[in-house]
Amino acid sequence: MSKIRELESRILEKINPAVGFSVRRYVMAVGFFVAIVVFGLISTLGLGVDMFPQLNIPVVVIITQYPGATPSVVDQQITQVVENQVSTISGITDINSNSTTGRSIVVLQFDPSTNQNADAQQVAAIIAAAVKQLPVGVNPPTVQTFNPNSLPILQFGISGQGESLESVAIWIQNYLTPLIERVPGVANVTTDGGPSRQFQVLLNPDRLASYNLTPQQVVTAVENSAINVPIGTIELNNNALTFSTLNVPVDVKQISNYLVDPSRGISVQDVAVVRDVAVATDYARVNGKPVVLVSVQQTSDSNQVAVVDGVRKLLSQTPLPKGYSLVYSNDTTGPIRASVQSTYHELFDTALVVALVVLLFLGRLNTALSVILAIPIALSAAPLLYHLAGFTFNLVSLLALIVAIGIVVDDSIVVSENVTRYRAMGFSQKDAVLHGASEVFSAVLAASLSILSVVLPVSFIGGFVGAYLQQFTLGLAAAVFFSLLEAILFLTVRLAYTPESRPRTWRDLVESLRMLPGSMKWGLSACIRPLGIIVWVVMLIALVATRHFVFIPLLALYPALLGALHYLVRVLFNLLESVTFTLHTATEAGLDWVRERYARSLGGVLRRGRWVLIGSGAFFVATVVFVAPHIAFNFVPNSDSGTIAIQLFLPPGTPLNVTNAEAAKIESYLYKQPYVSLVQTVVGQGGAFLGGIPASNDVNMVVQLAPINKRPSVFDLISTYRPALFKMVTADEPSAHLQVYAGGGLGGQGNALQLTLVSPDLSLLTARNA
């Protein structure tokens, strides 16, 4: 029996070295954890904000122009040649091509683990070598990378009362654009809706006939006169002088004086009328009002919210010319701010619920506060890791913090409960911490390592899925690992050196209400101590420095204020202790009741274990067979951003004015809808943002809806708008293509379903497509 007691004594007296070191060297432990929390707070304030993690999208686009060629010619002589050349490149997972009149587009998708810039350089080198296989008259192919940052993050329209859009466009180009491009993170600024300057030469057939001239002679004369070509370079004494011939027309008079037939002295003005006009290549409107639409694009390494804030701040400080007005029509950071703000609220609500649960089950206010303090301490490691890894605050990284809140307190609860048990056994406060924490050290370590062993391997998953999960798993792992250190090295310090007090009841609260005279005496004695005198002098200096002389006589009430504060703190502490003790008692009683009922029912369940297993299996099978197939799956959850995007594609070659008329019909329908607050329209922009070419048959609209609390879901509205718009558009042009979407996809570009028809017979494809 004595040997057993001796063995028990050795086990109880064994102190874990890490626990003993932290408790005895508490200054070092406090300094280490305070430093981590401070750096975590600094990282939190410096992190950017995005909707989702930034992705590496290894897509390379090859665009080749062949003016006048039919789609079949483009496919045979350009697209197939390009596809055969690039098919030898390693790392390509998919090749898509599109051959239209005068243009070939080949899209190469690489493995996500590859580097996009390196892929583009490799493709450019192969295409440069394959140019000689292309027919004569083909423009040199361009190799571009697909960059989601090419999409505008902020768009606003500017109009001028009494001023033409041409004047507005010139002011934007010469004055506003250079200012915006200086904002950190701005990559490019483009405009739509501004008429372009054009010199038109209107030939007179009668005059041409009288002078025996052809239209081609006039065209040749203008082209040969308007030149801008280099001549050569002269180098002398390490100095280089470059010469060029520059004769670009700047006004109508200069073009009118170009000689068509120098031998007879016939000029352009003799056979034609030259005019300087503003020609609209596209149209831009906001709520039906013509504007010059300014689109701001960000750099790949910038933060979207910070860039938009910088541009908005610049515009608020930039005076507009008289009569000019500015309206924001598409701010893509609105959904980001709303989603992240909602996630912040979820984060604080979760922390509050966890704190309440800890209070209910631990029962002591000081112990519960020590455990609750583990939440901000452990979570501070995640922002620090995000900052070092170049991550941002987004829905994925913030979700990791929300999940971590319920995990990081587990270790602290286990340690504090065991320390409380040792205190009940009669150990001193410090000894209880040393023995209690040492006893559960291996259990706490095993629990944390088991979580890390599951979470960390997920961070090594490649591809697009890995890019999303990496921030979640690393943030969660950092918080869990730091919670282990906090429970063993810092919570033990707080429990060992925080003064203890006996449990407070409602009787103590009643007694504290009678202690006002004692608190006033404490305040009087505290104000004559050195620290109290220093505080009084500081307050006096502050009032004098701020010239609040009226409040100086109130300093005579300084002892009474100290006494009142001491009284309120004591009453509040006793109130919280009493409430906590009462709730803890009720919680323990409820748990005892549940425990007894569970113990009584367990025997009956075990006697019918076969039926329990059969029922559980049937429930699982029913869930998989009948419920799971009806649950929609999206990798990125749909979110109600309050924005609807509409794209209309009319048949190629449709005149710009016809496309504009169709866009006006769609606008007219949208203006009548009760939940539409703003409509931004761009006609003729095409795929310019994605490296494409503006087309006269293209319409892009951004529809801003009313606040979410004043309207139905955006997806319900789309199900209403899409059929009506489709019916309206196809009534005029049956072959028109209409897209109406919101949320999902990359950058909110919708969820696309692509169907591909394959056949060696082009006529059969044409028939099936119709």
Image (tube, rainbow, N blue to C red):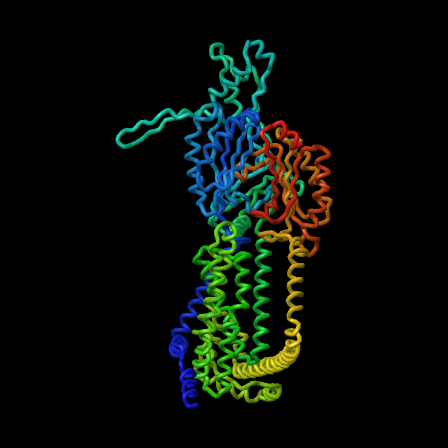
Q: Position of residue 608 (x, y in %)?
A: 66, 72
Q: Position of residue 272 (x, y in %)?
A: 57, 17
The answer to which of 448 and 406 lies nearer the viewer is 448
Position of 732 with respect to 304 (left or right) is right
Q: Where is residue 231 in the image (x, y as percent from the top left)?
A: 37, 24
The answer to which of 144 and 187 lies nearer the viewer is 144
Find the residue positioned furthest to the left: 237
The residue drawn where x is 43% and y is 58% is 388
Find the residue positioned furthest to the bottom: 2
Which part of the image, by quadrant, shows the C terminus? Answer: top right
Q: Is residue 752 above or below residue 492?
A: above
Q: Is residue 474 above or below residue 743?
A: below
Corner quadrant of residue 126: top left
The residue drawn where x is 58% and y is 17% is 203
Q: Position of residue 178 (x, y in %)?
A: 48, 42
Q: Is residue 283 above or below residue 510?
A: above
The answer to which of 527 and 85 lies nearer the viewer is 85
